[in-house]
Image: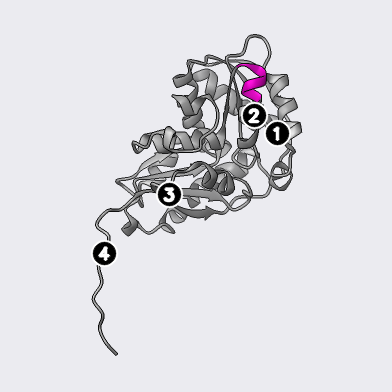
Amino acid sequence: MTAFPFDTNPNEPIKLGLIVLSSDETIEDEFRAMLPKSCSLFQTRIHSAPEVTPDTLMEMKAGLATSASMIPPSFNVDLVGYACTSGATMIGPKNVATEVQKVHPNAQVCTPITAVMRALNTLGARKIGMVTPYIPDVSQEMRNLLIENGFEISALVSFEVSTEAIVARITADAIKRAVRAASVDGADAVFVSCTNLRTVDVIDDLEDELGIAIVTSNQALAWDMLTSVGISTAQSAVPGRLSKT
């Protein structure tokens, strides 16, 4: 046996962590299609109930730090995203950051709901149509949070589904019809919520058709994570008007 010499690469890429719900079937495919090769993505999962209710969403708070620890602190990730729009709304973005930073104290933390609000502000959109897959109790909490942060909700359209396995299978045509229904009364943009809803492939077509910005959970979270670590969306495949900001 011969001890063979080797070199190590001194240049490390930007490192992003992503906490994905155990019930989510969508975000990983959509994320990998959007992120540039100039960053590395490390994923972990958090236990989530198959039914989305205010109570089941709040239950995830207790597991955030444990799930974050499955991305080893020695990786020195630059940023961790918690991939649940409704969960971040119910738990609170600041509480999400507190739990994740127990494990990764030097990492930035992003959530879809804060990413969406930052995206809407960047686009100059104040009057917002909303599309969600959630039951009314969850949709209303998200609507209230947006209003508290200065947005006007012109319409709220929901599929009113609580089962994640169904959400992941809602068709592109159904999503397009819902966005059209929400794009009323002079809306500046339509926000389509949920990381498990397959939305990335419909954004450009809807923006061309409706003439307004379309902001979705996965698109906004990818955009926010990239821009927060200094990566231009021009280097990525983030769709829609958001990619031009």
Q: Are marks 4 and 2 in contact (CB under 8 Å)?
A: no
- 122 w.r.t. 217: above or below: above
Residue ID at (51%, 35%)? 238
Q: Disc 2 designates what residue?
A: 139
Q: Are marks 4 and 3 in contact (CB under 8 Å)?
A: no
Q: Disc 1 designates what residue?
A: 135
* Residue 94 visible, this orientation: no
Res 8 label: 4
Look at the image and give the residue range highlighted in magenta. Answer: 206-211
User: Which amino acid type is shown beneath numbered disc 1?
Assistant: Ile
**Magenta segment, principal secondary structure?**
helix
- 162 w.r.t. 144: above or below: below
User: Which amino acid type is shown beneath numbered disc 2?
Assistant: Ser
**Distance CA(mark 3)–CA(mark 1):** 29 Å
Q: Is 96 on the left-hand or right-hand side of 214?
A: left
- Disc 2 on helix, strand or loop? helix
* Residue 144 visible, this orientation: yes
- Disc 1 on helix, strand or loop? loop
Dot in front, 3 or 2: 3
**Distance CA(mark 1)–CA(mark 4):** 51 Å
**Distance CA(mark 4)–CA(mark 3):** 23 Å
User: Which amino acid type is shown beneath numbered disc 3?
Assistant: Gly
Mark 1 / mark 4, whichever is N-terminal: 4
Q: Is residue 208 magenta?
A: yes
- Disc 4 on helix, strand or loop? loop
